[in-house]
Amino acid sequence: MWSVTRQTQELTPLLALCLLATTVPTIAAEPDFEKQVVPIFQQHCIRCHNDSTKDGGLSLETKQGALAGGENGRILMPGVAEESLLLDYVVGPEPEMPKKGEPLTKTEIETLRNWIKAGAVWPPAVRIQEAQLNDNDWWSFQPLTQPPLPELTDNEQQQVRTPVDAFLLARLRKAGLNYSPPADRRTLIRRVYFDLTGLPPTPAEIEQFVQDSDPRAYEKLVDRLLASPRYGERWARHWLDLVHYADTHGYDKDKLRENAWPYRDYVIRSLNEDRPYAQFIQQQIAGDILNPFSQDGVSATGFIVAGPFDWVGQIEISEKLIEKKITRNLDRDDMVATVMNTTVSLTVQYARCHNHKFDPISQEDYYSLQAVFAGIDRAERSYDPDPETASRRKTLQTFLEQSQSQHQRLDAQIRKRGGGKLERLEAELKRAMNAKQGQGVEYGYHSQVEKSDKTPKWVQLNFKQPVTAEKITLIPAFDNYNNIGAGFGFPKRFRLEVSNTSDFKSATTIADHTQQDYPNPGTSHIQTDAGQKKFQYIRMTATKLAPRSNDFIFALGELQVFAPDGKNLSSQAQVTSLDSIEAAPRWSRQNLIDGKYYQSLEFYTDLSELKQKRDDFLASLSTGEEKKSLQQLSAKIQQLQSNLKKLPDPEKVFAAATDFPAQGNFRPTKGQPRPVHLLSRGSEKAPIREVAASAPNLIDGLPGNFPLRDPDNEGARRVALAHWITSRNNPLTWRSLVNRVWLYHFGKAIVDTPNDFGKMGAQPTHPDLLDYLASRFRDEGQSLKDLHRLILLSTAYQQSSRTNPAGSELDGDNRLLWRMNRRKLEAEAIRDSVLQISGKLDLEMYGPGDRLFVLEKPQHSPHYLYRKYDPATAERHRRSIYRFIVRSVPDPFMESLDCADPSQLTPKRIETLTALQALSLLNDQFMISMSVFFAESLEAQSADLTAQINHAFQTALGRSPEPDELKILQTIGAQHGLKNVCRLILNSNEFIFID
């Protein structure tokens, strides 16, 4: 608290400013403010006295704050050091400030004194923030080299199966410990099966392995499991935990993300193919740039956008509001955290509001990483699974754009010749429209504007139940506000479809005008015979938008659907659209069905005649050669469009996107990065300066600055970051990955904070082992499967998990791995094992996620109802990796078993033992249903209860029951039935834990 007061505090702000500008004679040289004064404030003051915390009401972050003073008045008197409270607080044998840390040195005090005497010159642009740490000596930032294998005794050498053992045994010897005996073969095959595939071995597989006398039997088993497609499914789940993948957006509306799954499939496929790790990372950050014509190149970028999406903030909030900037800031924050936490184990997001408190990462470093992703959004984008189709589509689109541009230029030249007469004809058209217009009538529906006329737009009606229609009428919009008149925004090409489902996958087309331009679009009502079709939904899709001066739109005044008795059914329908401009009273989706519109059919007939007159005059302005060129260009455009239509429809994936259909206020960047600013205290209201895309300068020999030819090239920014991360000079990347693999095999990592290799994180228990594995992985092909082999074939991995008194006393947490860790199966492995044991597991791979819930009200805020889903009657039961994952409403059964929270990055799952878990495993409807199926499969093999129990044990646990176990279960089976015996077995510790 600032407690000292002086009479001079009564000085007015005007006098203070005068003093600040006054040159006061001093004995010592005036200190350099930025080089000498700023470091003093950074070291001793700014942590407590900044714009955010303002201890004592004082901020020393800016010149204005320092002059304003604190709760007890002003503390700085420029030119008058003796009257400045600032000095009083920091001098003396027991100074009041700083409250924490070392007091200022005599030199620092004299520097402040001389600075004040000299007028306390403080350039207005200088804002003081906490100093960036320059400590790059932390273990994780050091160069990665391969250490030599430690020297071992002869006895230790006999225990070495892979280099992993050499490092572990040398450390155990120092602690007075040694390995435990090897695990028995039944335990070992179950361990490695669950580790690599997430599924249990069958009784036959266990028996075969137990009886196999081949010395390489275990090695062959490991190779076989690594070659199994089940391996990719198992290990993809680990990766999806890291990136908080889900199939819904999260936040309050938590809408469905229908096409997130291609990214999930990309991860599975990449792991099964053993893609080199650098390529795996590069594709996920910039695959659409590095491999633009490949399926993987586009779908891999689902990595960047796997996290939550703020539907309200992105789509519904206006660009003019500060909330929009905040939304985008937080959106990029998630992208930065996902990429950097996952790939290099750095918590860069902690530098959003200030320099990182523990690691040498500045606030500018953080926002420079945000700038890398400033040109992309989370959205659906199209891609062609077939590379040849992708290349062909790109070529056709390029030629089409060139032809359309040539056509537009020639048309503009011809129109210019029309001079005043053309202007008069068009003015006559407008006068005719304005002469008969009404007032106060809403205009209709209006889409978002587009830069291309090829962007599809649609608007549809939902009658909420099937209706029978006789006639459909499309009434063009009439825009008086812009002095355009009738026909405003009516598309040149369109189709009209009806359907009984909202996705229009089985729609019936009742009017198709998509092959050639509609004559005089919008100058007359369009009536279509509906043929008394019965449907619930009707949709009008514009496939070629109406041109304006600089863009293209789709507008419609009324969409009327008439019943056989002449009643207009539209007035009670619900209107939805791909996007819209809601600008009441003129433009609103609801105006499409309000029954209010301009003019009669006769009026539009008159307009059509006037428009024909204008078009005839336009035709007279062109030469024969120009007409021929226009015709040829039109034919060429039509042929190119036809060829494009013949290509297979592209697929959709939710991924990093620069171009997508606009929706509300959510509009694509078209590849032009949005400006990103360094923000004071992380506030969008306080931008300091724009920053360039770059990475932190943390590693010697790995500069963070990106050598970009075009700094505004969005894709080049991401490519540069991908190469920075995967550089062989970046030790963080390789150490991070190896540490994660170790964690998943042993249950504990070498570095116990997998997402944080900074000073807030843990230090490695075996640094030489970590560096050996990381350097070998980096330099010898970056094969994850080779890394698995190296670990799984070690003696350390094959140990028993049984404890012993000596080990427990010297290393109770087993950090030195004197035994194997006993681990609990994850929720997915438990569910998948239950499915396999019950005979219901469907091994079909890939494709959209399976919804283990009933979906209600999907249009607004979806309801995900797990209690209404019946697993007993489900069509199929695929592996849990293919579940449709909801962020806001997780599956209660899976959540009770410690499933990862898809709203958070999960580097390491929590492992709990609760009563709720036991109750879920016993009473959840899934477990009850699968127990019934399990019992039925046992009964189909034998009618004898003892034989059934024996087979149940072999199937679920890989062994026969002990006599006392058999006796207890025979009693339960006789009294309560075989299905309840199955429930008990599936709820046993032996089933859900792996030794």
Image (cartoon, rainbow, N blue to C red):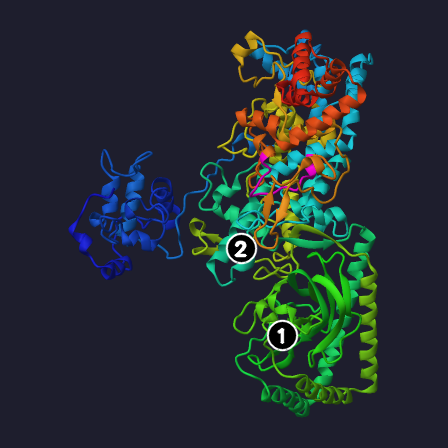
Provide the secondary structure element on which disc 1 rests.
loop
Q: Nearer the viewer, residue 143 or 855?
A: 855
- Read off the residue under disc 1: 557
In-front residue for pair 616/3: 616
Q: Can see residue 537?
A: yes
Q: Which secondary structure type mostly characterizes the magenta part of the structure? A: loop
Q: x, y (%) of residue 529?
A: 76, 73
The answer to whether 493 appears left or right of 713 in the picture is right
Amino acid, disc 2: Val
Residue 898 against residue 627 in the figure, above or below: above
Mark 2 Cα-neighbour bin, 10 Å: few <14, some 14–19, many ≥20: some
Q: Is residue 883 magenta?
A: yes
Q: Can you tell which quarter of the image residue 510 is in? A: bottom right
Instruction: Read off the magenta span.
Output: 880-892
Q: Is residue 328 left or right of residue 948?
A: left
At 49% from the left edge and 37% from the top edge, which residue is drawn?
359
How far, Cα to Cα, is label 2 from label 1? 27 Å
Q: What residue does disc 2 label? A: 312
Q: Quadrant of residue 789?
A: top right
